Image: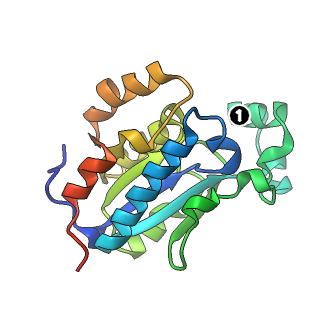
């Protein structure tokens, strides 16, 4: 595991994942969740670390290129057309809107890496440590923890800025699965791990 006292802001990025209008609205106490994400973003910005945003959305071409064997494609095809790239429902929640210079990627699968240039954008900034916040715990967060660990990032998961519609699944992942590959912390604990703004 990582040393929880050694977060170097120059080499660290907070990834805020799938905090989109349609997805945020599916979570109980979404206002509280977003408020904690805002706090985490503010702390990271104040320390000088990087902030990145990951969103899931599809163009017509994306949909045409999803093979029939894809479970993701089946879910998107069966659902409403609310996940199109230009739909208001796929835009990042305005309460956590990106700033100029932030990392922003659009994905067409569950994890943050496989269909994006996220790894390259992180490498360009010298990032080797990721702090993860996202919806859902069993979706984008789980996939990104697994992939990020395989890519040798030091990983932190913000347990209270991450949510799942199934509270028992969230608890299982936070308590039993993620600690094998990441350091699980709260937003309040994050403040103590980052240097104060100069």
**Residue 23 showing in the rendered view:** yes
Compared across the picture, whether 114 is left or right of 80 comes to left
Question: Looking at the image, which residue is at 81% across and 33% down?
Answer: 79
Disc 1 secondary structure class? loop
x then y, percent, for residue 93: 63, 56
Q: Where is residue 32 in the image (x, y as percent from the top left)?
A: 49, 43
Mark 1 nearby-residue class (10 Å; few <14, some 14–19, many ≥20): few
At 20% across and 68% down in the image, what residue appears?
195
Residue identifier under label 1: 70
Q: Which of 26 and 90 is in front in this view?
A: 26
**In the drawing, does residue 116 fall left or right of residue 133?**
right
- In the image, what residue occupies the spot 77% across and 37% down? 76
Which percent across, then down, holds residue 109? Answer: 63, 45
Along the viewing direction, whichever of 33 and 103 lies nearer the viewer: 33
Residue at image point 59% right, 49% down: 18
The image quarter in which residue 122 lies: bottom left
């Amino acid at each position: 595991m990582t040393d929880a006292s050694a977060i170097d802001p120059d080499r660290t990025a907070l990834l805020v994942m799938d905090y989109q209008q349609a997805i945020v609205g599916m979570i109980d106490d979404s206002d509280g969740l977003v408020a904690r994400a805002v706090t985490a973003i503010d702390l990271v910005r104040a320390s000088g670390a990087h902030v990145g945003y990951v969103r899931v959305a599809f163009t017509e071409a994306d949909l045409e290129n999803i093979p029939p064997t894809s479970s993701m494609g089946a879910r998107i095809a069966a659902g409403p057309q609310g996940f199109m790239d230009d739909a208001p429902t796929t835009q990042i929640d305005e309460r956590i809107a990106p700033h100029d210079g932030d990392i922003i990627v659009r994905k067409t699968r569950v994890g943050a890496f496989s269909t994006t240039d996220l790894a390259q954008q992180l490498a360009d900034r010298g990032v080797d440590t990721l702090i993860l916040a996202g919806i859902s715990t069993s979706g984008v967060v789980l996939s990104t923890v697994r992939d990020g660990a395989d890519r040798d990032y030091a990983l932190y998961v913000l347990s209270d800025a991450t949510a799942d519609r199934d509270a028992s699944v969230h608890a299982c992942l936070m308590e039993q699965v993620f600690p094998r590959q990441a350091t699980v912390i709260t937003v309040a604990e994050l403040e103590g791990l980052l240097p104060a703004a100069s």
